[in-house]
Structure formats: structure tokens, C-alpha cells
Image: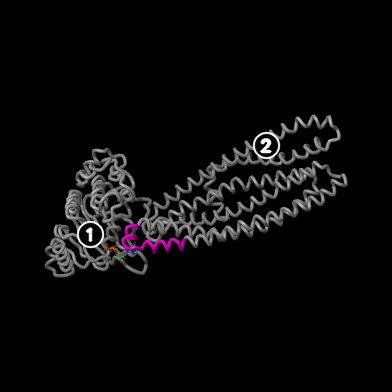
Amino acid sequence: MKTYLRILQYVKPYTKRIVITFFVMIITAILTALSFYIIKPVIDKILANPDKQEAMKYITILPVAIIIVYALKGIFMFIQHYLINWTGNRVILDIRYKLYCHITDLSMRFFNNQKIGTLISRITNDVNSLHGALSNVLGNIISAVLNILGLVIMMFYLNWKLALIAIFVFPIAVYPIVQFGKRMKLAAIGLQQKMGDITSVLNESFNGIRVVKAFGMEEYERKRFNSDLWNFFVYDMKAVRAVAMASPIMETIGAIGIAAIVLLAGKAVIAGTLTTGTFFAFIAAITGLYPQAKKLNDMNNTIQVALASAERVFQILDEKPEIVDLPDSIEKNDFNDKIEFKNVVFSYNKDEKVLKDVSFRILKGQVFAAIGPSGAGKTTIADLLARFYDVDAGEILIDGINIKKIKISSLRKLIGIVTQETILFNDTIKNNIAYGNPDIDETKVIEAAKAANAHNFIIKQLDGYNTFIGDRGVKLSGGQRQRIAIARAILRNPPILILDEATSSLDSESEILVQEAINNLMKNRTTFVIAHRLSTVRNADYIIVIEKGKIVEEGTHSSLYQNNGLYRKLYDMQFKLDEKKNI
Ligand code: ADP
């Protein structure tokens, strides 16, 4: 019920339309009852009328009346259907958009713990089945109830005793409705979960198709996918059983009602206390009544499925974004002095500290390098500076202001991030470079591309800057993708740059071009670089060496080298590797 009330909140903005729809439904219900009632005069006034002259009169009037009643019923049914689905679809649009906005607002920690496929499944499949609940409740249930009401009133009007008998069978039909509803809900929960698994495998394997192929894991992935498909099949069949059983049971109950009426009303007709017309109109009304009850049952099933989905959608909407602007947070549009980490402690999971008491200071204009073994915590430091996560203890200051007090949007504008995995979108090269600056003019884009050593290869593409680069940039080489990402950062022109240097080996020509582009990007900026290259390390103004979440050494290249500690070890190791590479 709570879930229902919550869904209805999204319907609220469309109350006016719903009220109109309701009136249309009442008219349709009246016309439906009338379309059954009309059988009575057809039989009594024409077929069984001893007064032939009167019968001739009716034989011209009634067919016209029949056409009018059915045509009007048709028109109002169309309007009703259209209005119901308009509201349903509109509400779905709202929920999907709200869900997407909410998810994009959630913190990195949320995404770490979620499968992307599952999230996609929430926005597509779950919201889809929610649509079922909306249009069913809004429309079909109310309209079925109104139709039932119309028919029942008509039946009482025709003959109240017979009506009572027909109605008596009705509550018996309610029991299976409730039972099948319960079964459907259980099956639906399973079904949606399994669909989430399926989407997840698809997402993982298609995204990682390169790895799948390289490791010859096609067969393994197929098995994984097949097993998910089978799980889905099993739950689907459970749902099918519930649906398939509902129909025959409901019909049998309906038949009992009809049989009782035939028996009792038939006797009354023979005894002459009931007209033949009333008898047929009555039977017609009952045959019209039970399908409506069956409809209620079917809708109950759809609704149970939808409620299961709605609960999962709301579960995501209830997730609170971890990183939010404080009420008194400020805009900060420039960087003037220094970045400071003061006794920063951080953990992804409560049990393991990833950073333990990290303090350092980056002065404006410096190239500040962090080096250390893999898993030491370098990327984490960069992510904390961009406030993808909040520190557990200690503070991070920019120009003496705690970054928690700076508006997130304004903080992220101060910082540009170029990472090893370049994220490009399936759009034109121009739009990929201009990502984050949609209104920028083309000459600036070209300027940035030139500085990033990307212009020459871009103009060689089929449509130059307007070439589509394919999903995640698959149509470009690794080095080209990186240079586009660098052009994007140059265009954005942030005063602070976080640079996670590429370790993946590019061919030497590509590497020179990328390195040149990076040098251009670093000009006139303050750079925090997660350094892998000897050249960067050697030229950095200041270096921190991180091991297991702690700064174990710090200083300039020469002082650290003389120290003969971890830095020297790592440096010598790299040097040897590079020598090998150059042979
Ligand atoms: P580095 O950049 O120095 O290689 P990271 O900062 O990426 O190291 O990782 C530091 C530690 O934090 C590692 O032990 C890693 O396993 C862990 N870690 C990194 N990212 C996450 C995450 N999203 N969730 C949980 N643990 C993480």
C-alpha cells in the first residue's frame, strides 16, 4: 500500500486529466450497460411482440439505436484508452528521468557497489513494468469496476431477485484473484532479478569483448549467459502457470453463475413471470460481467509484478548521495596559492584503511608527483582531491578552504583529470573534445586539438571533426583516444590538473606525440601526477613516495635518490625496464 501511495505521488500532477478520464469512464460504463440492455427491447418489442404494428415501428428505431449506442461506446472507449495511456506514459517519463538524475547524483561509492547492468535494468525493465501498474490502476481497474457497477445496476433494474443470485457467485471469484496475485508477485520478483543478471552479463561481456576474445572465454561467457537465461525461463514459467490457471478457474466459477440463472430464470419464463427479453438481457449481462472479473484478476497479476518493480525503483531513489553541497558552500573560481592534505585518513570499506595520516602540500605552479607500488593509494589521493569520496578524518584544503565547503560543481571546474582509461562517448570528435563546454566555438576546439597533437589525425578522418568515433572511441587507436582526452582537458582549461600517466605501452611515435600533448597540457598549471615515467619523476618539483597508504619518503628527485630508500629502488627498477624497452 505504501508503495502504491508513493507511485500515486507521481500521478498527482496530472489530477485534472485523471478526473476527466474518470468521467469518460462513467459514460463508457453506462454505454456498456446499455449495449446489453438493448437486447431486452429487441426481443420483447420485436421478436416476441404480439402487436405486429408496434413491432414494425421498433424494427426501424432499434437498429438505429443499436448503432448509436455501439458507436458512442466505441468513441468513448477510444478517448478513455488514450487518456489513460497518456497519463501512464507521462508518469513513466517523469520517473525514468528522475531515476536517471538521481543515479547520476549518487556518489562513486554507490557505483562501486552496483553492477551497471542492474542499474540499466532498473531504468528500463523495472520502470517498464511499473507502467503496467499505472495504466491498469488508473484505467482498467477503475473502468472494470465501473462497468461491473453499471451491469449490476442494470441487472437489479431488470430483476432484483435474479441479480442477487448472480452477485452471490461473485465473492467466490475474489478468492482465486487474491491467490494468483500473490503467486505472480513472487514470480515477478524472481523474474526481474534474473533479468537484471542477464543485462549485467550482457553489459560486462560486450564491454569487455576484447578481453573475452583475447582470453578465449567466449564459451565460458556463453555458459554464464545460458545459465542466467535458464533461471529466467524457470521463473517465467512459474508466472505462466499462475496466469494459465487463473483463466479456467475463473471461467468455471462464471459458468456456475450462468447455470444458476438459466435454471431459475428459465423456470420463471416458463411460468410466465419473466419476459423472454429480460431473460436474454440478463444472460448477456452476466456473460459481460464475468469477463470483467477476469480482467480484474489479470490486472491484479500485472500490478503485483509492477509493485515488485516499484519497490526496487524506490530503493534506488531512497539512496542518499554521499557527496553533497553543504548549505553554506561557496563558489570558488580560481586557484591562487596551494593545495594541502592534512592528516588525511580514508577507507573504502570500514575494515581497511587505504590512506593513513597523509599530509602534503602542493604549491601553485608545481608539478607534484606521487609514486609508489600499485595499490599504495595514489589514485585514491587523486579521487579525494576531486571529492569523489569524502575523507574519514583530516582535511583537504585549496587556498586554505576545506573542499567540503566549496560547491562541488565549482570544485570540479577547478580540476581537470586525465586518466589512463580515456572515456570517450559515441559522438563526433568535436563534441568529445567539447564535452563539458557545449557552447564553445569550433576554432577553440581546433586550437585545443592542435595543442594536444590531435589535429593532424583528426583532419585525416572521413568527416574531420564531425567524424563519429564509435562506442567508447573504438574506431581510434589508444594514442589517438588519449590525445582527444588531452584536448578535452586543454579546452576545459582547469588551473589544477590530475594526471594519471599511462602505463600501457604505446608505440614510440605515439608515445612522443602523447608526451608532447601532455607537456602542453601541463603548461601554466598545477599538476598532481601519478607518475610512471622516469622523465616525469625526474622533472617533478616535488615527489611523494607512497607505500601501503602512507607517505614513506618525500623530496626532490636528487634528494630522494641519495636517500637510498624505496624511491631509489623503484627508480632503478624503472630505469632498467626502460633500458630493456629501448634495446
Ligand atoms: P594505486 O593508485 O596506488 O595503485 P589505489 O589508490 O587505486 O592505488 O588503491 C589503494 C587501495 O584501495 C588498494 O588496496 C585498492 O585495492 C583499494 N581500492 C581502490 N579502489 C577501491 C574501491 N573502489 N573500493 C574498494 N577498495 C578500493
State the image coordinates of residue 130 (x, y, percent, origin top left): 53, 51
* Relative depth, front residue between 25 and 364: 25
Residue 153 in the figure: left or right of residue 437? right
Rendering quarter of residue 372: bottom left
- Tell me how the rendering is colored: one colour
Give the alpha-carbon distance from disc 1 to disc 2, as whole Å.
75 Å
* Relative depth, front residue between 355 and 112: 112
- Splitting the image into four quadrants, where does ligand 1 fall? bottom left
Magenta span includes 268: no
Q: Secondary structure at mark 1?
A: loop
**Looking at the image, is mark 1 or mark 2 earlier in the sequence?**
2
State the image coordinates of residue 66 (x, y, percent, origin top left): 71, 35
Image quadrant containing the C terminus: bottom left
Provide the residue designation for mark 1: 503
Image mark for residue 51: none
* Residue type marked 2: Tyr
Residue 357 visible from this viewpoint: no
| Residue located 49% across and 51% down the image | 127
* Relative depth, front residue between 547 and 431: 431
Q: Which residues are magenta?
A: 209-228
* Residue type marked 1: Thr
Q: Residues within 10 Å of mark 1 (few under 14, many from 20)?
A: few
Magenta span includes 214: yes
| Residue located 53% across and 43% down the image | 13
State the image coordinates of residue 84 (x, y, percent, origin top left): 57, 43
Provide the residue designation for mark 2: 70
Rendering quarter of residue 222: bottom left
